[in-house]
Image (cartoon, rainbow, N blue to C red):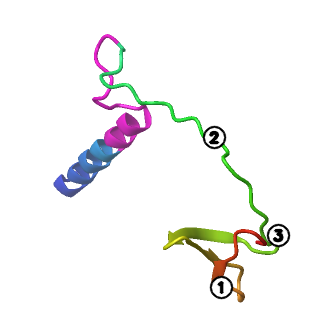
């Protein structure tokens, strides 16, 4: 085995070991006892209102601007950016 072959083998081994370590979930957020260091707060959504919506619109983004609902929609060849009337959709 030449020096170049050996170097390539070592590089491949190190890369494979790093990929394997990452795939196994190796991280520092869990201590040795297995308990989490920080708890994540669970958020529970609550529906406060429902509004009609254009069923043909594929919504990609929503923004509230000065009380107006701005919607970005997208289908190949027919994307729109529009202000939506919240009462009629």
Task: Depth check: give the residue in front, 31 or 36.
Answer: 36
Label number found at residue 46: 2
- Residue 6 in percent (x, y) is at 22, 49
Q: Secondary structure at mark 2?
A: loop
Q: How many residues crowd mark 1 within 10 Å: few (<14), some (14–19), many (20+)? A: some
Task: Indicate left or right for 28 with 50 as reference.
Answer: left
Q: Earlier in the sequence, mark 3 or mark 2?
A: 2
- Work out how far the residue at label 2 is from the one at label 1, CA to CA, in angstroms: 29 Å
Q: Quadrant of residue 58?
A: bottom right
Q: Is residue 81 above or below residue 21?
A: below
Q: Which residues are magenta?
A: 16-33
Q: Earlier in the sequence, mark 3 or mark 1?
A: 3
Label number found at residue 29: none
Q: Secondary structure at mark 3?
A: loop
- Residue 82 in percent (x, y) is at 63, 83
Q: Residue furthest bottom?
A: 77
Which residue is denoted by mark 3 in the rendering? 55
Q: Earlier in the sequence, mark 2 or mark 1?
A: 2
The residue sitting at 32% across, 32% down in the picture is 27
The residue sitting at 79% across, 65% down in the picture is 52
Q: Residue furthest right?
A: 55
Q: Is residue 11 above or below residue 55?
A: above
């Amino acid at each position: 085995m030449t020096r170049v072959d050996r170097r390539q083998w070592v590089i491949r081994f190190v890369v494979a070991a790093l990929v394997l370590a990452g795939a196994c979930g190796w991280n520092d957020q869990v201590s040795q006892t297995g308990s989490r260091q920080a708890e994540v707060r669970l958020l529970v959504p609550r529906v406060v209102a429902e509004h009609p919506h254009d069923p043909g619109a594929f919504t990609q983004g929503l923004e509230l601007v000065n009380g107006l609902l701005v919607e970005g929609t997208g289908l190949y060849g027919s994307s729109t950016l529009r202000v939506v009337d919240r009462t009629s959709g």
